[in-house]
C-alpha cells in the first residue's frame, strides 16, 4: 500500500450566509448585479449552491437559473444558465464573464423581457466559511477511505467541489492527493469524473468509496 509523506487533512466546514448590497428585480438588473457583486457572491450562487442543495438531481444547478425560472418566468434563460458546468472554471472572473454574457445576450435578444419585473427580487448573498481540521489525517488509502466515510455533507462539498477554485485546477482535493500523494493517477481521474450534477451527495460518496474499494482489492 502506498503511503504519502504528507497525510491528507480532512476539514469540517460550516458556512454563514449574509446578504450583500446588490439585488435585482429585472433581467437587466440581474446582469448589472452579476457584473458588480463580489467574487464571494458569484461563488455562493454557483459553487455554493451545489453544496447547500446537496447535489439535488432535480431543479436547477445554480441560484441564478432558479431565479430566472421561478421568479422571472424565463425558462429558456434558466436552462442556459443551468447548462453552465462549474467544473469548467478555475477562476471566478471567467465564470462571472460567462454568466454576464449569457444574461446580456438574452436581454439583447428579448428586449421586451429585459425590464419586466420579476415576482420576487434576487438578493446577492455571500458565504462566510469557517473550517477546522476534522482530526482524522490519512496517510494510506485505507485511512483515506475511513475519513471519506465519516465526512459531513459540508465537508465533502468543501473537498470535492469548492476546492476546484481554491486549487485553480480542474480537479478536487481528493483527486489531487490521490494522484500526487499516492501516485494513484487512474483512481484520481475516476474520482474526478464522478458527476456532481446527476449524483446526490450520498451517491457521489458511495461511488467514490466503490472506486477506492476496487483499488484496495488490487493491493
Image: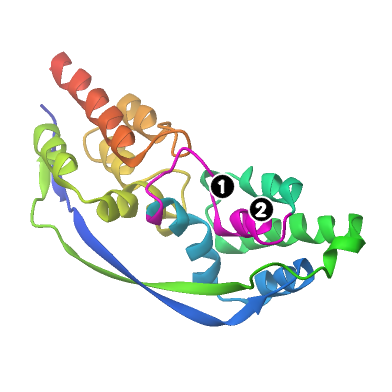
Which residue shows up at 64% across the image and 42% down it?
A: 83
Circle on res. 41: none
Q: Quadrant of the N terminus?
A: top left
Q: Are marks 2 and 1 in contact (CB under 8 Å)?
A: yes
Q: Residue furthest front?
A: 119
Residue 184 in sight from this viewpoint: no
Question: Crowdedness of circle 1 by 10 Å Cα count: few (<14), some, many (20+)?
Answer: many
Residue 158 sits in quarter? bottom left
Residue 73 lies, with reference to residue 4, above or below; the image says below
Place of residue 11 in the rendered image (x, y in percent of width and height, measured from the top left): 20, 58
Q: Is residue 53 above or below residue 181?
A: below
Q: In screen coordinates, is 89 left or right of 187?
A: right
Left or right: residue 116 compared with residue 120? right
Q: Residue furthest top?
A: 218
Q: Residue at x 82, y 68 (%)?
A: 116
The image position of residue 147, as x and y in percent, is 14, 43
Question: Along the horizontal axis of the image, is 169 left or right of 88?
Answer: left
Circle 1 is placed at which residue position? 60
Is residue 45 visible to the viewer in this orientation of the structure? yes
> What x and y, as percent, mark residue 127?
41, 71
The residue positioned 72% from the left and 62% from the top of the image is 100
Q: Secondary structure at mark 1?
A: loop
Query: Is residue 201 found inside the magenta-colored segment of the image?
Result: no
Work out how far the residue at label 2 is from the one at label 1, CA to CA, in angstroms. Answer: 9 Å
Q: Earlier in the sequence, mark 2 or mark 1?
A: 1
For the C terminus, which image quadrant?
top left
Q: Position of residue 88 (x, y in %)?
A: 56, 45
- Which quarter of the figure has residue 146? top left
The part of the chain drawn in magenta is: 52-73
In the image: residue 29, left or right of residue 192: right
Q: Which residue is mark 2?
A: 69
Residue drawn at x 25%, y 62% is 13
Amino acid at each position: 500500500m502506498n503511503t504519502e509523506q504528507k497525510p491528507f487533512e480532512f476539514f469540517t466546514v460550516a458556512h454563514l450566509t449574509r446578504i450583500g448590497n446588490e439585488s435585482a428585480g429585472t433581467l437587466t438588473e440581474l446582469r448589472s448585479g452579476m457584473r458588480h457583486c463580489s467574487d464571494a457572491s458569484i461563488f455562493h450562487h454557483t459553487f455554493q449552491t451545489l453544496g447547500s442543495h446537496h447535489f439535488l438531481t432535480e431543479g436547477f444547478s445554480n441560484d441564478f437559473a432558479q431565479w430566472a425560472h421561478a421568479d422571472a418566468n424565463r425558462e429558456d434563460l434558466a436552462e442556459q444558465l443551468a447548462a453552465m458546468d462549474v467544473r469548467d472554471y478555475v477562476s471566478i472572473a471567467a465564470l462571472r464573464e460567462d454568466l454576464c454574457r449569457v444574461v446580456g445576450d438574452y436581454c439583447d435578444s428579448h428586449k421586451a423581457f429585459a425590464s419586466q419585473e420579476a415576482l420576487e427580487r434576487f438578493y446577492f448573498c455571500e458565504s462566510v466559511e469557517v473550517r477546522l481540521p476534522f482530526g482524522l489525517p490519512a496517510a494510506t488509502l485505507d485511512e483515506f477511505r475511513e475519513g471519506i466515510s465519516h465526512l459531513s455533507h459540508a465537508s465533502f462539498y468543501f473537498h470535492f467541489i469548492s476546492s476546484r477554485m481554491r486549487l485553480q485546477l480542474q480537479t478536487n482535493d481528493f483527486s489531487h492527493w490521490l494522484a500526487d500523494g499516492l501516485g494513484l493517477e487512474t483512481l484520481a481521474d475516476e474520482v474526478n469524473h464522478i458527476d456532481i450534477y446527476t449524483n446526490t451527495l450520498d451517491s457521489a460518496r458511495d461511488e467514490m468509496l466503490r472506486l477506492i474499494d476496487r483499488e484496495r482489492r488490487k493491493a
